[in-house]
Amino acid sequence: MSGHNDARADGQGRIYQATGDQYITEHHHHAPDWSGPDSVRRPAVGHTPLVLRDRVGEMDRLRAAVEPGVGNRAYVLHGLGGCGKTAVAYTLFQYATNQAGRLGLWVNASDPASLRAGMLAVAADRGATDGELVGARSGLRPAADLVWHYLDRSDRPWLLVFDNADNPAILRDGGWLRTSPTGTVVVTTRQAATYWWPGAELLQFGVLPREDAALVLRDLAPHAGSIEDAAEVADRLGRLPLALTLAGGFLAHQVIEPWSLADYGRRLDGSTGLDPIGLIEQGATAIGGDSRHLPSRTWQLSLDALAAQGLPEAGHLLRLLACWSSDPLPLSVLLGAELGPTLPASHVESALRGLIDHSLTELAPGQIRCLRTHGVLLDSVARATPADQHEQLSSAAARLCLALLPEVPDRGTQDPRVNLLAPHVIALLRRTASWATSQSTVEAAAECALRLVVAVHRAGDYASALSFGSDAVELLKPRLGEDGILLIRLRQRVGRTLFRLGRFEESEALFRKVLEDCERTLGPEALDTLSACRRLASPLVILDRRPEGISLFRRAAEGYAQALGRADPVALLARSDILEVSTEPTDVDAGPGLVMECRREVGEDHTVTLGAELNCAFTLNRAGRPTEALPYIRSAFAKFARRFGSDHPIALNARQTLGATLRALGQNAEAIAHLEEVAEGRAMVLGPNHPWTLHAEELLNQYRGSQRAS
């Protein structure tokens, strides 16, 4: 054979051209070439809600979009995986098809193949011929144009749902997402970035209100407990619809030994040895879910998409966030965040933007710019974090917290970010304990806790300081031991908050144990031991064991003077303590000289100087010398009130001493006015039943009685 042959093959045909004899054998195995969905008229979802809880405003908006005559609209339902976007779309689909007279069309948009096959099935449903569909599938004609041609000419109004469109590029690049006067489009996605959805109305979905979250559990497991039990479990699950559904499904399908909601809630804290995320995921088989219905998998799908977009750093940043709490986290914590090559500092901004765009975290409203990440998500991320990353992550989290927490906070109002960091520091302590990180990392986390408790205490929020300090001590005790210096300092802080809260006996018992531990492990002259002496002395004086208390105050003052010098601020402070408790003439006479020394050594407005002025005035007035006391107490009160606010406990103490001094001088009206402010302020700050509140009210009654008698 010679010459040219022109030929074309169709379908499974082949063209062969050869010289000489050729023997060719072909075997053709024919299979259907249609791989589309079995139906686009029914939502392809696993579990459907018995009742859609909450979402009232969103559903009103969406129902209006499928009323007769409404078209040319697109709605994007976005939020964290598991927040119920598909459940809302499903509920709307049922309403549109059963009550609004619409044709419902449901397409899985999670990947290009599923989207393409689903949309061609929509075209077939709306009248496309086999030849047109073959041409679209083979690439001989634009597939999206074909589909929308038939949607635009549909003889019935329709609702088209693109479900799980977590990679919007799939919709955009093929031109699949459009609007039409004959129908309404709804998209469910985790992708929150508005630039993906031009012309669409965005509806954000988050967690449920507490009452509705409790009802979701009761819908699925009505006999497992009361509505109060359900609300407590819902809080533990962060009120995330997916977690609630899994928990309810698990409780509803137990056979051998059914748990109550209370049983389930107790096991969620991990104290029984069960992994909380593993426990939640046991409910997946009960609802017939796939891997998208597992908390440990749902966030990984988004991270995989981010990695495919060139943002693998987003996963490392999310693992760093998992060291902290689900409470609002100040964004400034992330200044200087880096994890070496896996998360350079220059990539933190883009990584964070990726997490926000994929609804893995969100910006929280408020005066301070914060992030908020769901607790179930954080726990599942922490659970899946490789062990060889634990040390680096927790160490970086501690370093970033330390950068924001003041090393030596002053009394008075603190940076508002300090209180915001409190739950994150406690969460970090739990993470370092569960991850078994190195001792140095545990100590860095303990230093965070100590700085936090000191700052909150000095702000005058003693109840919060006690709560944070007690939690920190319990979490750190297994790793640091009773004799660890950071644990000793934290226990001292707990004792000080107990004292300020009027729990003097508890404070005395704790300080006595701390002093014993300090003397045994650090020695009698160590600075922490001397600090324990000072702290134990205060409740002893209150509890009428004044000689022992004064003895400890003197021991501390002498020890500090010897170790640091008499002019050191700590030594001056310890010497000032003696003025408050001693009635010895030599101590009373030493007061004015100590005030002058403080002014010279640390300054007129230093906190140590103001404390010396207050104590000097107190002891002079008690010794019957109110005229000498008045200038000192007026100075101290004015400066305390100006610096810390008139309701701060130290300002109230100074105001009480000022009132007592004025009364001794016969200025009863002004004295009563000050005591009224003290009684009101202490009731507000410390509570109406605090011993110091009751004492102020008692003094006030005495002053009023004296004024009436005169």
Image (spheres, rainbow, N blue to C red):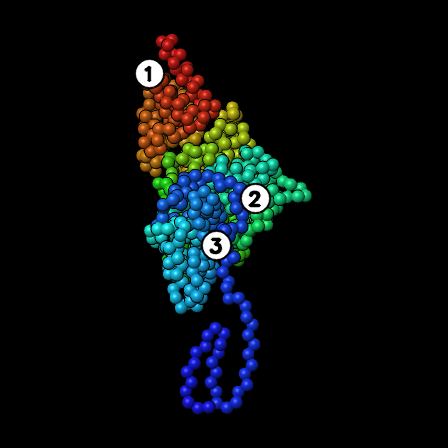
**Residue 29 figure quarter:** bottom right
Q: Name the kind of residue labelled 3 in the image.
A: Val
Local SS, label 1? helix
- x and y percentages locating residue 573 in the rendered image: 41, 34
- Give how far apart the Cα atoms at labels 2 and 3 are: 30 Å
- Give how far apart the Cα atoms at labels 1 and 2 are: 65 Å
Which is nearer the N-term, disc 3 or disc 1?
3
Q: Nearer the viewer, mark 1 or mark 2?
A: 2
Q: Specify whether 386 is left or right of 562.
A: right
What residue would you read off at disc 2? Answer: 247
Residue 203 or residue 267, whichever sits in front: 203
| Quadrant location, the C terminus | top left
Residue, far top = 709
Residue drawn at (55%, 53%) of the image? 290
Q: Name the kind of residue labelled 1 in the image.
A: Ala
- x and y percentages locating residue 497 in the rendered image: 48, 33
* Residue 299 in sight: no
Question: In the rendering, which numbered label is found on residue 100?
Answer: none
Which is nearer the N-term, disc 1 or disc 2?
2
**Tags 1 and 2 touching, CB below 8 Å:** no
Question: In the rendering, which numbered label is found on residue 669?
Answer: 1
- x and y percentages locating residue 546 in the rendered image: 50, 25
